[in-house]
Image (tube, coloured by chain):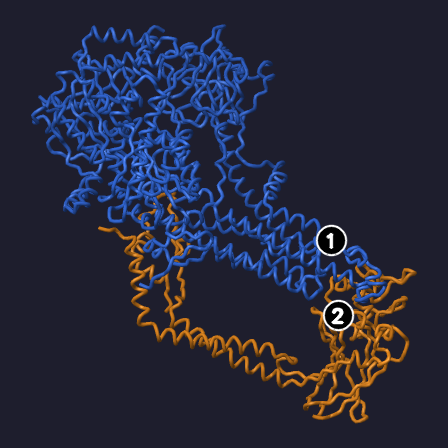
Chain colours: A blue, B orange
């Protein structure tokens, strides 16, 4: 027991911020109140108290319909379309003598059309149903009394059950972590399915329950959990656990969410608190906003217009009919005696000609119904599905490396692809690969690494230097290691020992090998080590250290073991460092540090972080290489690299002891601002550092991105890049992917100027904000002036704006100006923008310019943008599935966008629009013959064609050619679409965009 | 002239040609299968409307249409047609102020007409009556019949849809019921040439399918035209409906308010300047709705009756095509030298606008 406690203690120290003693915060007082009424009887789901609560089971249903609700619900969906309602009314009226057609011939087409659409719904729902069945029948071990665990289907789980989840299994419901196979009751969780983040998250159980490591421990386990009601918030949780009359607070730290996965942990025990639809992931799942294409919206208008014509025609007909009918019997004299106007029904009664005319109006509405294409919607749906099959089948959009073809998730928007006017793109993972490569470093004032970045290549290309040639040749014969693109014989293969500052290099590499939170995974077959890291950057560092001779191979809770190259003997030695503290990375701290004790017993603080925070923390005697390093960092940034500063410091025992005490106290404090407190203390020790050097990793551009952007620009499509990166990086990437070109004038709107910094520090926040806003406004106006005054010769403008300025630029009174400026610019880059800003910018462009926007992104942070845009394209890359799940179309690489838009978009748009035109043409041409005939039949409502011919005309006879047109028609071949992208420029509304074919 | 897209793309697109062969297919690969169909590379041809192409097309259409037009016009002109409008002339002058009263009276309505044959008429000479302003296509009228009853003896009492001519006042079903049958045309014509009777063959004037399948051999008229209001002709109750060809012809309702119906065939040739005496019973009331009545004698050609429309339509379209071909040729010859560089320049400018200003 004592041993356990000590280890636990160690552990919580290692993860300084994410792990700590939980405390009752303000929120916990809400428990039991409204919104926080859930009571869970752990391990006792069958008890009377639990059965009273009657929480729903763990059966989940993602299908739209059930057997019982299918008909009412699906029919309701169908009759939300005006045209269908009209046809339904016609079908009902066709059973009265009003109808010009026989009832069956009138009802049948409607049944066929509705049946086809509903059949499609059934098919789609059936797929979901099969998935549900699979999920519901998964098995998990559940405590079934007497300390025994047995397999139970997921669907049979009940609130209060204690389950045992094993490694790499999904959690069947929302659980409260009770204990794990680790002594410390921690576990690692992968939440890719929830938020797309691939890094492992750490969860830790309460002390009170953490010692139950055996199945048998649960024999007599009883606890009551009181917590919040089911809600959609993934990152908050408030609850309390009552165990042996003691109250313990529960936080998100103990919550394991359904659909996340247990990793690196043998097994855990957990109590089910939310099941089925109550789980956070289901509470979160809202259907994606249904998007309709512009063509379809316009089509609705045309249908309304046709309705107008229909009513007008019927009205005219009724007037003539009324007059003719009245004249049939005047003063007892029959005119058209063969109609027997003296002995007739209301429909033809000359004495009540007005009534007859009104009734005839209804008849005529049905008679001319052939103006409205009944099968239009269903045909369009069929066509779109077939079109998206073609998109999915396109080999040119298949990515071999990840084995991913393009996937049109909704077929609604095929033709919208051909109308795209503005593309809003994420940068990381979309334009770039999001696989970081360690490419350069600066150690002790010397820059190492001869690799050439994409940006440098682009720069060289611009200047016309022959650099490019050499580089590409060189690259081919290099064996590639993922994440490592470093080439310098001065420090590779252990030759660093001969460099002038060998000791600094050693410390530098050691720091790379130790200062991180990655986990090593040893491949049992070949002994190779791969790493599981929170971010690709971090993985790149550890891999670089490994390749340079410092192989990190084992991590325990208290130590890090590294194979090091001994500079004296030249052999590999194993060294282990006992890990004392990890001061983790956070976006506010912009750095991470570890405190370790080496085998010699020296205490080391190893730190890496952004240049903006690291330089100010250097000791006087640690600034030896500051100037050179700064220079190198600027060079690296120009080359489009991400840089980090590495520094270290030796601690003396006394200082550490004091720090540790304060830090532990801060962490265990019960106040709400515990984290700030801990940060403050961490900050105290992260100072007087000695600079070692800097690293540079490249976020590589994806293949073919510059070419693709070029092509899209030729097609007149604007590309906006919205990124979370620094301005410098964003600009460099902009150059690399030919978004920015030499000769473009850059309008930079930034709030990162020194003046604004001082403003921010001032006390009066509102005044500062106002001043900042004024400054942004001023910059915008200046940019606008530049835009207005500019003539062609000066070259196009590029707008670059940072996140803070964007906040002000998106305010209601400024946004029009911002938009005007942005539209006038050839390229727009928004850096440091938050997910919300991305969505806001998208909305702004969409609503204000009423042009079609396409958002493309790969991460969870792009979801808002993807849903806001007219079309959301997800990159099915490394950053999880979140973006793909909320996208309309998923592709594997940015460059496929070219084909998607210029070929498929073009075709689909043309096909759908000509198909709709064809549809209206055939129906109007047909419908009018009926009307013209009426003129010769004294508007009596006699159809000129046979009933069956009429009803089959729309549904069968004429629908196949139109569908064929909609699926197969190509105005020009794919090759010409790509070659002559410019006809994309003109966007006349529904008139199909013309792509003139040039004989070659 | 014709450009085959796919043919060119499959040869000239190295990208497309290169990718189809998958390198060693991996297990459970999601790689789409290659086929020309799924990759939308099926061969296709697309005409480009160059001046030469357009002119040629018009020319071909013109060449094809004008002869067709001339032939059909000649065929139509070959047909000899004599039309005699008689509805006013057959009313005694004294009664012409109130024609309706005359036609409804019991006075003798026999009337003689003389028709001069203008041109030799080859047999068979068809005799039609033509009615005008008679809406046989009125919805009430069209529906007012019962096909079941006409077909089957067992369905004699089936008179739905036939109102008001469905039953006699005492409830007996009228066979054939409905307004169409009730208003059966009842003018009769007798023809003689040089005092010699010309027989009018009234057999086979109705459609064979109607006789065989729509009107029953065992269905005999009953209670027909017994009401207070007499519509048109009476029917011989001893003859089954399938033999009542006048009725069958009449019951095949006309689509337009002006229509001709076959009355019979004269199976001899009529010579030019023959005088045909027609004795007709002018019984049918078209006066209430001021409809015309005409007697038509006509021969047929291989194209049917006299109808110039088809020939004229062909000639017009063909002529228009010739005209267009000619004018396009003139325009083309006059301008193509100056026209070509302009086109090139335009496309070049359009291209350069989007190319990099390197």
Percent of width and height locating residue A797: 28, 42
Residue A860 visible, this orientation? no
**Is disc 1 surrounded by few (<14), some (14 to 19) or many (20+) residues within 10 Å?**
some
Q: Residue furthest right?
A: B170
* Residue B143 - label: none
**In the rendered image, the vertical position of residue B1 relative to residue A972, given as above or below:** below
Percent of width and height locating residue B217: 80, 71
**Is disc 2 surrounded by few (<14), some (14 to 19) or many (20+) residues within 10 Å?**
many
The quadrant in which residue B308 appears is bottom right
Q: Is residue A52 left or right of residue A557?
A: right
Find disc 1 in the rendering and name its residue.
Answer: A359
Measuring 90% from the left and 68% from the top, which residue is drawn there?
Answer: B226
Percent of width and height locating residue A279: 49, 25
- Classify the position of the N terminus of chain A by image quarter: top left
Q: Chain of mark 1?
A: A
Q: Nearer the viewer, residue A991 or B94?
A: B94
Disc 1 secondary structure class:
helix
Q: CA distance from mark 2 to mark 1?
A: 23 Å
Measuring 43% from the left and 53% from the top, which residue is drawn there?
Answer: A988
Find disc 2 in the rendering and name its residue.
Answer: B134
- Classify the position of the C terminus of chain A by image quarter: bottom left
**In the rendered image, the vertical position of residue A870 relative to residue A27, given as above or below:** below
Q: Is residue A738 left or right of residue A856?
A: left
**In the rendered image, the vertical position of residue A93 relative to residue B244, given as above or below:** above
Q: Nearer the viewer, residue A939 or B279?
A: A939
Q: Is residue A90 left or right of residue A954?
A: right
The quadrant in which residue A518 appears is top left
């Amino acid at each position: 027991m004592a041993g356990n406690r000590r280890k636990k203690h160690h552990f919580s120290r290692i993860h300084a911020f994410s792990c700590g003693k939980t405390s009752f915060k303000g929120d916990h007082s809400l428990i039991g109140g409204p919104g926080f009424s859930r009571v869970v009887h752990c391990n006792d789901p069958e008890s009377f108290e639990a059965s009273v609560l009657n929480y729903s089971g763990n059966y989940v249903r993602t299908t739209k319909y059930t057997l019982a609700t299918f008909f009412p619900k699906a029919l309701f969906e169908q009759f939300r379309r005006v045209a269908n309602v009209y046809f339904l009314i016609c079908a009902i009226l066709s059973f009265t003598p009003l109808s010009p057609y026989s009832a069956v011939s009138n009802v049948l087409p409607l049944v066929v059309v509705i049946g086809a659409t509903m059949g499609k719904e059934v098919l789609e729902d059936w797929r979901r149903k099969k998935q549900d069945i699979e999920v519901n029948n998964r098995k998990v071990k559940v405590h079934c009394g007497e300390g025994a665990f047995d397999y139970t289907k997921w669907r049979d789980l009940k609130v209060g059950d204690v389950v045992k989840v094993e490694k790499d299994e999904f959690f069947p419901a929302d659980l409260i972590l009770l204990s794990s196979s680790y002594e410390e009751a921690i576990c690692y969780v992968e939440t890719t399915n929830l938020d797309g983040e691939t890094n492992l998250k750490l969860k830790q159980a309460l002390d009170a329950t953490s010692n139950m490591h055996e199945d048998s421990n649960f024999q007599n386990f009883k606890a009551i959990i009181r917590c919040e009601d089911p809600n959609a918030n993934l990152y908050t949780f408030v609850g309390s656990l009552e165990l042996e009359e003691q109250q313990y607070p529960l936080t998100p730290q103990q919550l394991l969410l359904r659909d996340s996965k247990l990793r690196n942990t043998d097994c855990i025990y957990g109590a089910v608190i939310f099941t089925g639809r109550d789980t956070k992931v289901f509470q979160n799942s809202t259907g994606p906003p249904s998007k309709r294409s512009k063509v379809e919206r316009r089509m609705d208008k045309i249908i309304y217009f046709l309705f107008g014509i229909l009513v007008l025609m019927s009205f005219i007909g009724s007037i003539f009919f009324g007059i003719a009918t009245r004249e049939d019997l005047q003063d007892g004299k029959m005119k058209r005696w063969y109609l027997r106007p003296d002995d007739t029904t209301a429909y033809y009664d000359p004495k009540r000609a007005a009534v007859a005319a009104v009734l005839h109006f209804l008849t005529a509405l049905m008679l001319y119904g052939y103006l409205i294409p009944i099968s239009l919607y269903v045909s369009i749906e069929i066509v779109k599905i077939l079109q998206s099959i073609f998109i999915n089948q396109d080999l040119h959009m298949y990515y071999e490396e990840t084995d991913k073809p393009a996937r049109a998730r909704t077929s609604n928007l095929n033709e919208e692809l051909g109308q795209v006017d503005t593309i809003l793109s994420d940068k990381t993972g979309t334009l770039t690969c999001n696989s970081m490569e360690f490419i350069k470093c600066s150690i002790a004032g010397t820059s190492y690494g001869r690799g050439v970045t994409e940006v440098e290549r682009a720069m060289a290309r611009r200047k016309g230097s022959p650099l490019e040639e050499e580089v590409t040749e060189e690259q081919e014969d290099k064996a590639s290691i993922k994440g490592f693109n470093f080439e310098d014989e001065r420090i590779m293969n252990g030759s660093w020992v001969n460099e002038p500052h060998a000791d600094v290099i050693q410390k530098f590499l050691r720091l790379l090998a130790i200062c991180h939170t990655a986990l090593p995974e040893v491949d049992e077959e070949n002994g190779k080590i791969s790493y599981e890291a929170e971010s690709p950057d971090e993985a790149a560092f550890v891999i670089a250290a490994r390749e340079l001779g410092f192989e990190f191979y084992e991590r325990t809770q208290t130590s890090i073991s590294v194979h090091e190259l001994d500079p004296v003997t030249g052999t590999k030695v194993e060294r282990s460092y006992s890990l004392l503290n990890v001061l983790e990375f956070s976006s506010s701290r912009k750095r991470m540090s570890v405190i370790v004790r080496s085998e010699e017993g020296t205490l080391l603080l190893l730190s890496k972080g952004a240049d903006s925070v690291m330089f100010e923390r250097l000791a006087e005697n640690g600034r030896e290489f500051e100037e050179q390093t700064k220079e190198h960092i600027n060079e690296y940034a120009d080359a489009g690299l991400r840089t980090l500063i590495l520094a270290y410091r030796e601690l003396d025992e006394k200082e550490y002891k004091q720090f540790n005490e304060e830090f532990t106290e801060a962490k265990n404090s019960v106040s709400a601002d515990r984290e700030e407190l801990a940060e403050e203390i961490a900050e105290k020790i992260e100072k007087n550092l000695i600079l070692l050097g800097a690293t540079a990793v490249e976020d590589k551009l994806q293949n073919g991105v510059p070419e693709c952007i070029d092509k899209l620009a030729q097609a007149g499509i604007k590309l906006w890049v919205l990124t979370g990166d620094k301005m410098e990086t964003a600009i460099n990437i902009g150059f690399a992917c030919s978004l920015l070109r030499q000769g473009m004038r850059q309008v930079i709107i930034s709030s990162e100027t020194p003046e604004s910094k001082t403003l921010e520090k001032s006390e009066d926040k509102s005044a500062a904000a106002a001043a900042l806003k004024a400054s942004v406004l001023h910059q915008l106006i200046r940019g606008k002036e530049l835009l207005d005054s500019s003539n062609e010769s000066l070259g196009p403008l590029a707008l670059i704006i940072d996140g803070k300025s964007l906040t002000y630029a998106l305010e209601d009174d400024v946004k029009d100006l911002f938009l005007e400026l942005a539209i006038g610019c050839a390229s727009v880059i928004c850096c440091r923008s938050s997910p919300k800003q991305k969505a806001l910018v998208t909305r702004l462009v969409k609503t204000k310019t009423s042009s079609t926007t396409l958002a493309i992104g790969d991460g969870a942070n792009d979801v808002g943008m993807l849903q806001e845009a007219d079309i959301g394209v997800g990159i099915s890359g490394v950053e999880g599935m979140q973006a793909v799940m909320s996208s309309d179309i998923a592709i594997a690489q940015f460059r496929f966008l070219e084909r998607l838009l210029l070929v498929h978009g073009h075709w689909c748009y043309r096909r759908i629009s000509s198909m709709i035109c064809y549809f209206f043409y055939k129906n109007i041409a047909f419908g009018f013959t009926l009307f013209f005939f009426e003129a010769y039949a004294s508007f009596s409502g006699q159809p000129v064609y046979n009933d069956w011919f009429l009803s089959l005309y729309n549904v069968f006879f004429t629908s196949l050619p139109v569908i064929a047109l909609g699926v197969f028609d190509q105005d020009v071949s794919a090759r010409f679409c790509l070659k002559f992208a410019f006809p994309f420029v003109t966007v006349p509304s529904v008139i199909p965009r013309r792509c003139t074919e040039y004989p070659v | 002239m014709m450009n085959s897209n796919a043919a060119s793309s499959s040869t000239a697109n190295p990208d497309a040609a290169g990718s189809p062969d998958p390198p060693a297919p991996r297990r459970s690969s999601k790689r789409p299968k290659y086929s020309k169909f799924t990759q939308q590379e099926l061969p296709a041809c697309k005409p480009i409307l160059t001046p030469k192409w357009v002119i040629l097309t018009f020319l071909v259409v013109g060449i094809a249409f004008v002869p067709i037009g001339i032939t059909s016009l000649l065929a139509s002109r070959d047909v000899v047609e004599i039309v005699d409008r008689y509805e006013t002339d057959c009313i005694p002058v004294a009664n012409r102020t109130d024609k309706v009263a005359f036609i409804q009276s019991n006075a003798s309505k026999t009337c003689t007409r003389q028709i001069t044959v203008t041109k030799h008429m080859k047999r068979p000479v068809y005799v039609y009556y033509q009615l005008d302003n008679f809406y046989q296509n009125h919805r009430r009228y069209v529906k007012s019949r019962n096909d079941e009853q006409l077909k089957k003896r067992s369905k004699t009492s089936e008179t739905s849809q036939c109102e008001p001519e469905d039953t006699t006042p005492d409830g007996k079903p009228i066979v054939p019921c409905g307004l169409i049958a009730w208003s059966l045309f009842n003018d009769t014509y007798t023809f003689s040439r040089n005092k010699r009777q010309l027989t009018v063959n009234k057999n086979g004037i109705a459609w064979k399918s109607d006789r065989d399948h729509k009107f029953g051999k065992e269905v005999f008229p009953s209670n027909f035209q017994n009401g207070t209001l007499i519509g048109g002709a009476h029917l011989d109750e001893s003859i089954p409906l399938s033999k009542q060809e006048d009725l069958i012809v009449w019951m095949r309702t006309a689509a337009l308010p002006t229509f001709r119906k076959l009355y019979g065939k004269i199976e001899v040739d009529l010579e030019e300047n023959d005088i045909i005496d027609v004795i007709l019973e002018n019984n049918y009331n078209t006066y209430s709705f001021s409809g015309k009545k005409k007697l038509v004698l006509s021969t047929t050609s291989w194209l049917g009756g006299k109808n110039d429309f088809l020939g004229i339509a062909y000639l017009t379209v063909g002529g228009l095509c010739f005209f267009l071909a000619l004018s396009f040729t003139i325009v083309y010859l006059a301008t193509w030298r100056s026209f070509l560089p302009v086109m090139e320049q335009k496309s070049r400018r359009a291209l350069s606008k989007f190319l990099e200003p390197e």
